[in-house]
Image (cartoon, grey):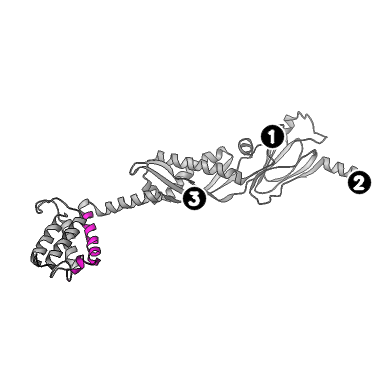
Amino acid sequence: MALMDFIKKQFIDILQWTESGDGTLAWRFPMQEMEIQNGASLTVRESQMALFVNEGTVADAFAPGMYKLTTQTLPVLTYLKNWDKLFESPFKSDLYFFSTRTQLDQKWGTPNPITIRDKEFGIVRLRAFGIYSYHLSDAKTFYQKISGTRDAYGRDELEGQLRNTMVAGLTDLFGESGVPFIDMAANQDEFGKAMFAKMAPTFADFGLTLDSLVVQNVSLPEELQKVLDQKIGMNMIGDMGRFTQYQVANAIPEAAKNEGGMAGMGVGLGAGVGFGQVMGQAMASAMQPAAGAAPAVTPVSADDVVATLEKLHGLVEKGILSQAEFDAKKAELLKKLT
């Protein structure tokens, strides 16, 4: 019985790998002190590849199928071992299996904001993230550059390398394209296609095929996003004069809510003048073209106008200033906002 156990441990008749689904990409068949029989059966399942390595030199590769190992099916190994006829004795050689299944839902992203030069906003820091998928397509290249002689090599061990390579490619892509950040963020699908085209050759260098790449988000850090929002708001306003009118239109209702402020002006800012009229005057003033308009006056801030109106209203309440005089002064101050 002990003799039979010894013989079973020494010779291998069937070589195969049943994947465990744990993300293993490369796995070395456990040879130990065993040798492969002449005519042994090699089974390579769908979504697998197999590779013989003799004393560190890559030999024969096998696609999915069932093979009987002879000098005909192992031509490279036959040459390396100088077999001039059918080998009759068992031989030793390393055998590696590789998983070619598509690795889905792999995540990439910038762990920290990356600094780029944007032609519209200057130097900015941005974040981006998304998902990608790939599969192992060249066992020889993957063995030589990535997995090597290890007993097993997992997907998680490769994730950091791929993610960092993609972040570096993202930085280069922004620099090379010259496309403003705002356009990249608005066209994530096109951005993803450009990034896919840039990264596919890099994956191929590792013996991998990049199957898909999706950009899910491109954004600025919160503090820079606030600056961008302000810039967008200024562009929507159009010019400083209109922005000032916009500010005072929002400031007057707030001041009217304050006790002792402009709320004591009756039905608005003065007799017969409502909030709607005042705001209409302010906005109409902003819309007047420069040509043919009244002589230019030095603009004042919205806060100064509100403060002055509050003081003047106090004089009206004390009887020092008439309502008509207040209305005239109010109109004069609003004109200075243009």
Give how far apart the Cα atoms at labels 3 and 2 are. Answer: 59 Å
Residue 170 versus residue 126: which sits nearer the camera? 126
Q: Secondary structure at mark 2?
A: loop
Which residue is painted at 19% across and 55% down in the image? 304
Give how far apart the Cα atoms at labels 2 and 1 are. Answer: 37 Å
Q: Secondary structure at mark 1?
A: strand
Discs 3/1, front: 3
Amino acid type indicated by mark 3: Gly
Q: Which residues are magenta?
A: 242-266
- State the mark number for residue 59: 1
Left or right: 101, with 94 as reference point: left
Residue 125 x, y percent position in the rendering: 40, 44
Q: Earlier in the sequence, mark 3 or mark 1?
A: 1
Residue 222 vs 256, above or below: the answer is above
Discs 2/1, front: 2
Amino acid type indicated by mark 2: Met
Q: Identify residue for label 2.
A: 1
Left or right: 195, with 103 as reference point: left
Residue 269 x, y percent position in the rendering: 16, 66
Quarter containing the C terminus = bottom left
Q: Place residue 243 in its image quadrant.
A: bottom left
Amino acid type indicated by mark 1: Ala
Residue 141 x, y percent position in the rendering: 61, 37
Query: Is residue 247 highlighted in magenta?
Result: yes
Left or right: 203, with 281 as reference point: right
Q: Identify residue for label 3.
A: 130
Q: Place residue 326 in its image quadrant.
A: bottom left
Q: Which is the main secondary structure of the residues drawn in magenta?
A: helix
Q: Earlier in the sequence, mark 3 or mark 2?
A: 2
